[in-house]
């Protein structure tokens, strides 16, 4: 695949860090117009209380309103397992199209079964406004953007490249953070390695923006790096680590990781493009499948 890289376009990127889930959401703005996009928004949940709030999303909405921006896209890099998306809430307030990779259908099929959803849960991605294929292009005002298929962490992961800025989702972490786990249903360490190599074939000076950072070894939270930095220094894939080395490291490490605290609510909400699931009476309600994950 020959991707339409355009380093001459330099979007303005505003990060919004969520302390609860160590997620970084972004507003990406066209420098030459009022158009913007939101990447990987967060809806707040107090899981113990079953309470949903919108402080994080409201901060982004306020930023967009204060700067008189037009929201054109609300992008999900993948179905997150550790935080809930606020895409529909933001769309209701500001408009914009909600987009995700077309392989969402694979994820919906898998977790439709896990959560024993009925036929009213569509597995065709129709909850989203746009389903991206590898290499699909779109625009944010005058900015040219494209989606790059990067499965491995999940089967539907996509990196979104907007001008000289790439939003990597969970394909990569900061160089000292390595890579994301590949042991969720549909994940695959070898496939993740191949996706990372594809991502690292982009130009060295491409800016990369992480979806997560956990401040390894006590350093401050960080979210921005470059392709060149990752290729040289990433502790899992940098400096020529082989596919076999990566698979061995990832498999060993993933076996030690607990499930993310919010995986049960996250999957049910995010596979619906951020809509809350409901019970037979239409009340918002989550399920907890026992021994199902
Ligand atoms: Fe993820």
Image (cartoon, rainbow, N blue to C red):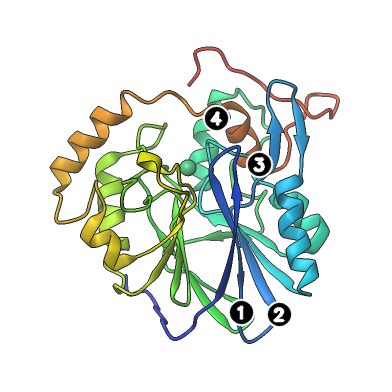
Residue at (54% x, 76% y) in the render:
11
Q: Which residue is mark 1?
A: 30
Q: Which residue is mark 3?
A: 272
Give the distance between the C-alpha atoms of the residues marked 2 and 1, in whole angstroms: 7 Å
Labels 2 and 1 touching (C-beta < 8 A): yes
Mark 1 falls on what kind of element? loop
Which label's residue is closer to the chain start, 3 or 1?
Answer: 1
Residue 195 position (above or below residue 1): above
Image depth: mark 3 or mark 4 in front: 4
Labels 4 and 1 touching (C-beta < 8 A): no
* Residue 170 appears left or right of 282: left
Give the distance between the C-alpha atoms of the residues marked 3 and 1, in whole angstroms: 29 Å
Q: Quadrant of residue 200?
A: bottom left
Q: Residues within 10 Å of mark 1 (few under 14, many from 20)?
A: many
Which label's residue is closer to the chain start, 2 or 3?
Answer: 2
Image depth: mark 4 or mark 2 in front: 2
Which label's residue is closer to the chain start, 3 or 4?
Answer: 4
Image depth: mark 4 or mark 1 in front: 1
Q: Quadrant of residue 74?
A: bottom right
Q: Which residue is mark 2?
A: 34
Image quarter hosting the N terminus: bottom left
In front here: 65 or 217? 217
Give the distance between the C-alpha atoms of the residues marked 4 and 1, in whole angstroms: 34 Å
Q: Which residue is mark 4?
A: 263
* Residue 160 appears left or right of 183: right
Residue at (63% x, 87% y) in the render:
32
Which label's residue is closer to the chain start, 4 or 1?
Answer: 1
Labels 3 and 1 touching (C-beta < 8 A): no
Residue at (59% x, 46% y) in the render:
124
Image depth: mark 2 or mark 3 in front: 2
Mark 3 falls on what kind of element? loop
């Amino acid at each position: 695949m020959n991707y339409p890289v355009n380093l001459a376009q330099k979007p303005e990127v505003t990060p919004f860090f969520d302390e609860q889930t160590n997620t970084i959401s972004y507003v990406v703005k066209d420098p030459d117009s009022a158009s913007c996009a939101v990447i990987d928004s967060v809806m707040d949940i107090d899981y113990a209380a079953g309470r949903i709030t919108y402080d994080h999303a409201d901060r982004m909405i306020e930023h967009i309103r204060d700067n008189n921006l037009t929201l054109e896209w609300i992008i999900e890099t993948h179905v997150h397992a550790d935080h809930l998306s606020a895409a529909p809430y933001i769309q209701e307030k500001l408009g914009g199209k909600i987009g995700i990779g077309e392989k969402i259908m694979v994820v919906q099929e898998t977790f439709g079964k896990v959560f024993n959803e009925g036929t009213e849960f569509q597995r065709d991605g129709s909850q989203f406004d746009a389903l991206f294929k590898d290499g699909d292009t779109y625009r944010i005002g005058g900015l040219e953007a494209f989606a790059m298929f990067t499965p491995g962490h999940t089967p539907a992961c996509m990196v979104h490249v907007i001008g000289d800025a790439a939003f990597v989702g969970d394909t990569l972490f900061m160089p000292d953070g390595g890579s994301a786990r590949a042991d969720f249903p549909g994940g695959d360490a070898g496939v993740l390695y191949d996706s990372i190599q594809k991502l690292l074939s982009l130009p060295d000076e491409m800016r990369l923006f992480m979806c997560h950072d956990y401040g390894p070894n006590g350093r401050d939270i960080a979210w921005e790096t470059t392709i060149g930095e990752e290729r040289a220094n990433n502790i899992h894939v940098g400096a020529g680590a082989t596919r076999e080395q990566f698979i061995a490291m990832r498999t060993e490490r993933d076996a030690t990781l607990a499930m993310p605290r919010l995986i049960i609510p996250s999957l049910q909400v995010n596979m619906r493009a951020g809509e809350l699931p409901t019970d037979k009476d239409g009340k918002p309600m989550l399920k907890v499948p026992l021994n199902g994950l």
